[in-house]
Amino acid sequence: MAAVLSAGTLWFATPAQAAPPENQLYYTVTASYQSAPENLWEVATRFLGDANRAGEILDLNSGRVQPDGDRLAEPGRLAAGWQLLLPWDAVGAELHSGPLPASAGSSSGCARGADAPAEASWAQTLLTPSRAWAVTNGAGVKVAVLAAGVDGSAAELAGRVAAGADVVAGAGRADNGCDGAGTAMAGIVAGDDDTFGVAPGARIVPVRAGTEPRSAATGISVAVAAGARVVLLGVGADASDADVRAAISDAISRDVVVVLPAWAKGEAADGLLRVGAVGADKQPAFPYAADSIEVLAPGVSVASIGGAVSGDEYAAAYVAGTVALVRAAHPGLRAAEVTRQVLSTATDRLVSPVAAVTTALPAGVGVNAATAKPASGLGTLSRVLLWIAVALGVLLLLPFVLQRPARLASGLIARRLALRRAQRARARLTTDRDDPFWEAPVSGPGRS
């Protein structure tokens, strides 16, 4: 319970004030401390006197390559031999001062793989997404990448990676995790290199989530709350799990398109795209069941920016980038309509970024981005005010318009009543059977 409560404080941890490199303080993790595996909360308590400062240690070390080639991503998982940078005010006999051993990796960034591997270029040549950029490059669309983090400092992603969120730790950011797979998928979605990148104008929202279903479900919910309009599930979670399935359904109901690798075993739904991989020969890389996927994309194993990503994950990233292009080109489309546009423009189920944004929408569905005029909030307000003015004018003029017919009707009734009174008076002058003394006038000579 103490560990869980302490994890929550990582959201509010004060940024660490690191000392200059020549005076760095660092600690070498041991197999155990007081007969228990080490963790950041225990390290913070021992050397900083406050378990809540574990977030500072996490910030200083996230993404650094450790001697065993791994990286710190979870505050509760440390490996013996790791070198942990500590804040300048840490105190303890086990601490070392000075430059980190070379094997501990650099604290200034992540170990990087080939930035533009030759293995990825065939996929870019096959799909030619750059031909769609005359219409849109995905600007304004947030794509959440659920993985073990994304290297936001990668040159190909500079300025397009949000801080994100760390669901595994319960707090913190996810743009400093340097995860190879997560960074590679983000690069495929929004990289601006000639050999990879489908929607370079899109913004990546990294979400560090685990493979455990509840963690993945929480990651999806966090991505939706962060404003993502596309969610790419890159963690190895089972999408058929009730929690994950509910999170996906909720995301779609909130107008978010969800993209899954085929291995995630998601159930078919409007607003969801299940993706399989093809090789350079355009043939499926695996024997997919007919009802397990909707669309295919390049997906052989490659080493992309920051590390390795393989098969269905790679393919799903290409589809997520294509969805970002469609969402930017046709912002009025709902999630289900976006997925239909992607599927209807695919060739033999192979996704086509270019066709997805240049093919006219079906009659009655949205507008074509190439001919649509930018929406004007001022114009909309003017039209509303105009209709209000017209309605008020009608209400004001209506009494005057109806006044003349009322007067005519009133005059006609009055004239009829007067005529009837005159007729009765005339009748009394000529005959009045009710008066016994009445005599009819005599006419003739001498009578006037």
Image (cartoon, helix red, strand yellow):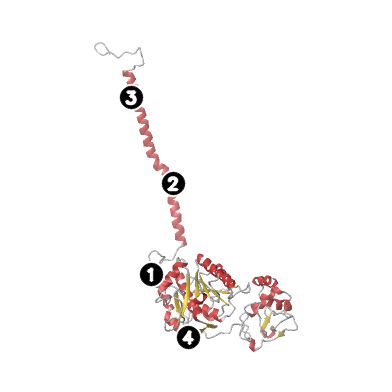
Nearer-N-terminus badge (1/3):
1
- Label 3: which secondary element: helix
The label nearer to you, 2 versus 3, is 3
Please, what is the three-letter code of the amino acid marked with disc 1?
A: Ala
Q: Where does residue 145 sit, x and y in percent of width and height?
A: 54, 75
Tag 1 near tag 2, CB within 8 Å? no
Q: In which quarter of the image is the C terminus?
A: top left
Nearer-N-terminus badge (2/4):
4
Q: Is residue 395 visible?
A: yes
Nearer-N-terminus badge (4/1):
4
Tag 2 near tag 4, CB within 8 Å? no
Crowd band around label 1 with a 10 angstrom C-alpha radius: few (<14), some (14–19), many (20+): some
CA separation in Å, label 1 and label 2: 44 Å
Q: Where does residue 220 sit, x and y in percent of width and height?
A: 55, 70
Please, what is the three-letter code of the amino acid marked with disc 4?
A: Glu
Please, what is the three-letter code of the amino acid marked with disc 3?
A: Gln
Q: Where does residue 73 sit, x and y in percent of width and height?
A: 62, 78
Residue at far right of view: 93
Q: Disc 1 marks which residue?
A: 360
For this view, does 146 lie left or right of residue 36? Answer: left
Q: In the picture, residue 209 is in which quadrant?
A: bottom right
Nearer-N-terminus badge (2/3):
2
Q: Disc 2 marks which residue?
A: 395
Crowd band around label 2 with a 10 angstrom C-alpha radius: few (<14), some (14–19), many (20+): few
Q: Is residue 16 visible?
A: no
Nearer-N-terminus badge (4/3):
4
Disc sitting over residue 423 in the figure? 3
The label nearer to you, 2 versus 4, is 4
